[in-house]
Image (spheres, grey):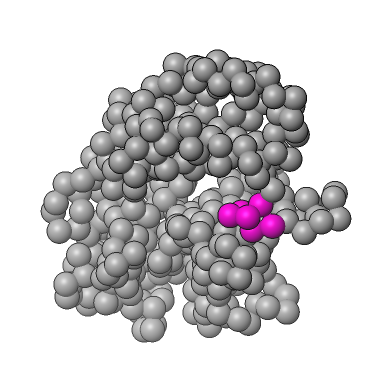
Amino acid sequence: MAETTLPYEGIRVVEFTHMVMGPTCGMVLADLGAEVIKVEPPQGDNTRRLLGSGAGFYPLFNRNKKSIALDLQTPEGREAALKLIATADIVSENFKPGTMRKLGFDYQTLSKLNPRLICVSHKGFLPGPYDHRTALDEVVQMMGGLAYMTGRPGDPLRAGTSVNDIMGGMFGAIGAMAALAQREKTGRGQEVQSALFENNVFLVAQHMMQFAVTGKPAAPMPSRISAWAVYDVFTVRDGDQIFLAAVSDTQWKIFCEAFGYADLYADERLKTNNDRVRAREWLIPTLRERLASHSAAELSAIFERSGLPFAPITKPQDLFEDPHLRATGGLAPLELPDGRQTRVPLLPFTVDGHRPGLRLQPPKFNEHGPALLRELGYGEEEIARLTPQATGND
């Protein structure tokens, strides 16, 4: 996508964010053309130094951004940050509640200086009885029903990715987009709030509504009563696994014809989808036994040829070589902070037929600080005093 066609080109975002939720909001806006300036503390964003499951946070969620390091604990650092905010359309933060007020950067204060400013706050909870609690993705998954639904009965299990952090940041970005559209009509900005807990509740709303409609509690996903008869993971030849589905009467007919299961198709107990759901206790073991001699590759070929739903059980690292992602440009070249080259998934949609891509690599610590301070009118001596020394932050 050409830069000139990016929808938020000309919008400046100043973000005081770390970890996943806040940076995701900025990443979405940045990928769509906004100039996103990441304000880091003198020691750098702690996300730069995370190990294990957090090792990929910084390069993924901070692409297409600029970095400036300011010490917000000093009057000089706060003054520089305030000057930067004065140039912004959007301020985004995910500090603990009350931190922005202590700094003098809360919406009530900033909106008096610039009524057009939009402030986006990413928190654990929206204002209410829980808003004093410290929230993490896993915390709200446990208290919000998602871990219960993901795990087996008696064994609550968090989802396999930071679903609330990422989606909470996305909803923060959606809120910012809505506020920008509203500003076009009113000329005024507004405050946007997004929260982990409320995001999690939205994710499990389908199970809440299932109870509201049926009066029966939703069972955890591993033990749920499926709405479809053939909708499961099968272990096949060589111990490989594959997900196979036939979710309609038409697909059941195609499935039986593809594998020569005339006896099953003729069985009156399996006439309709609901009949087959009621027969799952014996039908699924029968199918497991019959399909076990096939390889995953054979089953994939048959299901694809027949237009039936299927999926190999894929590990995240295998997606770097996924032929569809590679052919469609879904992975963009990215330089890691240590200089190594890799690829990164882009936003999962197209605009005018193009995926919003990478314009800026994840910034090195304070990479754009001096230039931004010059833009704000600071001289070289002042810049030198304001510029922290990099100490292994890249």
Give the camera-side residue of 284 and 50: 284
Q: Quadrant of the N terminus?
A: top left
Quick check: 284 above or below 213? Answer: above
Q: Does residue 200 appear anywhere in the picture?
A: no
Give the camera-side residue of 155 and 19: 155
Residue 261 lies, in percent from the top left, at 56, 21
Query: Furthest residue to the left?
Result: 339
What range of the chain is rendered magenta? 219-224
Residue 201 lies, in percent from the top left, at 68, 60
Which residue shows up at 65% across the image and 66% down it? Answer: 144
Give the camera-side residue of 234 and 293: 293
Which residue shows up at 85% across the image and 50% down it? Answer: 214
| Count of picture labels | 0
Quick check: 353 above or below 97? Answer: above
Which residue shows up at 45% across the image and 57% down it? Answer: 161
Side of 75 relative to 94 (left or right): left
Which residue shows up at 69% across the image and 57% down it? Answer: 219
Quick check: 73 above or below 67? Answer: below
Residue 194 lies, in percent from the top left, at 61, 61
Residue 350 in the magenta stretch? The answer is no
Q: Does residue 173 appear anywhere in the picture?
A: yes
Q: Quadrant of the C terminus?
A: bottom left
